[in-house]
Amino acid sequence: MSLTPTDRARRIRVLLFDVDGVLTNGDITILPTPDGHATEIKSFSAHDGMGISIARLAGLRIGWVTKRNSRVVAVRAADLKIDHLYQGQNNKREALEKILADEACTLEEIAYVGDDIIDLPVLRLAGLAIATANARPQVKAIAHYITPLPGGQGAGRDAIDFILSAKGILDSTIEAYLDPTNPEAKRTDIGSGNM
């Protein structure tokens, strides 16, 4: 018997994301500086950031696995207290194997959110394969779930809400986050944004 996407989501302990096109809209803006270098600019969704705080409060471990190396990604990952950050990953399966070992979990307990063909090797192995609304057709074809929103516009939050809803804990986790007396909510919240 085949598992439904909701059945798969109930088992998830670790949620992994690609970055460009998933947590951003995929644009890479490069501004040259007078010294001959450049500054890279990416825009991240605040909804995704809030979702990551909620997911952490619910007990999920969060990771980012991306092909590009970017200081912007490192800064945002630190701000969101991301558990696993792997940049420069031409072969994303290697990062997946390290995360599996670090978390002592199984593939069935991993969800991965991707948008392009470089994500296919991990999506094919993940217990819950999630494609963003803007994903390439090859990614959507193997996804167990497709987010309503595109990357950079709340797709990450869609994935988190789907998993926590499947577990039956989305509403209670939101209320725990909103409780001003809950020290765990403060601990899992995002950083100050001081870059």
Image (cartoon, grey):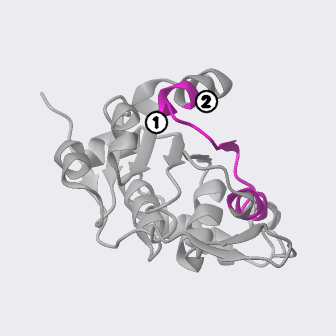
Where is residue 163 drawn, in percent x and y? 41, 54
Figure quadrant of residue 111: top left
Q: Which residue appears at 35% of the width and 71% of the height?
A: 150
Residue at numbered disc 2: 99
Where is residue 33 drawn, in percent x and y? 79, 77
On-image quarter of the N terminus: top left
In the image, is 145 to the left or to the right of 1? right
Amino acid type at image mark 2 = Ile
Q: Is residue 130 magenta?
A: no
When the figure is inspected, residue 45 is found, relative to residue 88, above or below; the finding is below
The secondary structure type at the circle numbered 1 is strand
Q: Which residue appears at 44% of the width and 77% of the height?
A: 153
The residues tagged by marks 1 and 2 sit, at their Cα atoms, a distance apart of 9 Å
Name the mark on residue 110.
1
Q: What is the crowding at mark 1: few (fewer than 14 residues within 10 Å), some, or many (at least 20)?
A: many
Q: Are marks 1 and 2 in contact (CB under 8 Å)?
A: yes
Query: Of circles 1 and 2, which is in front?
Result: 2
Amino acid type at image mark 1 = Ile
Task: Residue lying at the far left in this picture: please name it.
Answer: 1
Where is residue 120 drawn, in percent x and y? 33, 38
Q: Is residue 85 magenta?
A: yes
When the figure is inspected, residue 24 is found, relative to residue 98, above or below; the finding is below
Question: Tag 2 or tag 1, which sits nearer the N-term?
Answer: 2
Q: Which residue appears at 66% of the width and 49% of the height?
A: 69
Q: Which residues are magenta?
A: 73-95
